[in-house]
Amino acid sequence: MGLILAQTVRTIASFLLLYGVLIAGSFLIAPKDRATDILDTSLAPNTVYATATKYLFFNRGTLSPPRPRVLILGSSDADLGMRPEQMQGNIPCAQVSNLAIGNSNATEIRQTVDLVHFVQRPEARLGNTFVFGVWYGVFGDSKDRWPASSRKNAETDIDLELYRYGFYRHTPEGPHSLLPPSWLPMEDALIRPFIVAEAVARQLTGKLRGEFFIRPPNRTEAEREAAHFSADERRAATAYWYAQLGRKDDISSDEFSEFENTIASLLDAHERVVVVDLPIPQWHQEAMAYDAKYHQRLPDLLKKFGGRQGFAFFNLSDLNADDDYSDEVHPKPHLAKIWAERIGKTVNSVACHSSEAASRQQPEED
């Protein structure tokens, strides 16, 4: 019996030593990124985390210290059109971070808020100004965006990331963390070898995966500026978004309610919210009835929140010229700078002058 116990101890010790060597090796291959006070999910492909969701999950601890913060949330158009470095100059009182995740819907936006809150104490949350960049595309039902054929319970990309390494468990209310926020650095270290292996695999298969996109996923700014979205590409994009919203005749009421509930909970907790109605090119507006359905709901949203302190609404509806977009939704770099300039001024009125009445722009009814 003693011999078996001794052998078991030696085996466990050998395994732990080997895994420790793998952890050390993974940090040598991919050293820890330099600590920073802000996050920018667009940098994820250039880090060991590779994806925006993994980058956000393991780096969100940087948002825990109490200080004024502007947090940009939304999908890829929010990522490209509300760049922190372009908005920061108009928001002197707060640090601007980009937490946008491509292809997000309202559920993932709420989950992103939850990820931030998980690492923040109540006093830190009081410094938050959430900037939500929205358009009809973020109001597709999760069951349509992530169907059962690919994900059993319509898990979002954030759900998959939370469950991936066993740090969260399934509950009827959704993912539940098994460890407190203080353990995040330890979680990162423990699964670092897997993260490095995944990053290497993504690099090796990047070209192949790019073949499945309507357009190249990683274009330079010069390429996006020069892009011309052809008639065939417009038809493919229209079909894509029709499928993303489940081929229904309206956006998801559940997702819109989810978004309203997220806003209400933040305002009730004395956090600040700026909702930005992001434009799309005119051809896309005319091709998709979803855009009109989405805009029909905005006046009711304004009735609910328009009088609340710490809330502002802003739209960019005049910036819808077809030639200013590299595809069906993403602004070209010159237009993105205009977005950031205008939005930054409105965010400043809320984040830096929260005691004053925030300036608001009424949405146009369709």
Image: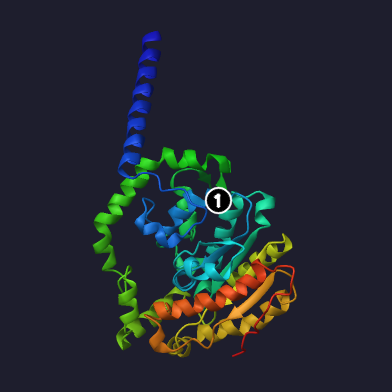
Residue 114 can be seen, yes or no: yes
Disc 1 secondary structure class? loop
Q: Determine which quarter of the picture holds residue 316.
A: bottom right
Which residue is found at the position 56% from the left and 45% from the top? 177
Q: Where is residue 115 in the image (x, y as percent from the top left)?
A: 56, 54
Which residue is found at the position 74% from the left and 70% from the top? 309
Looking at the picture, does residue 115 appear above or below residue 225? above
Which residue is found at the position 65% from the left and 66% from the top? 351
Q: Mark 1 points at which residue?
A: 175
Residue 173 can be seen, yes or no: no
Could you classify mark 1 by the number of other residues whose Cα lies within 10 Å: few (under 14), some (14-19), or many (20 or more)? some
Q: Where is residue 290 in the image (x, y as percent from the top left)?
A: 51, 83
Which residue is found at the position 26% from the left and 68% from the top? 211
Q: Where is residue 333 in the image (x, y as percent from the top left)?
A: 40, 77
Nearest the viewer among 359 and 199 is 359
Q: Position of residue 141 (x, y in %)?
A: 52, 70
Q: Determine which quarter of the picture holds residue 262.
A: bottom right
Disc 1 marks which amino acid? Pro
Question: Looking at the image, what colour scheme do you see?
Answer: rainbow
Q: In this view, does 85 lie to the left or right of 295?
A: left
Looking at the picture, does residue 351 appear above or below residue 251? above
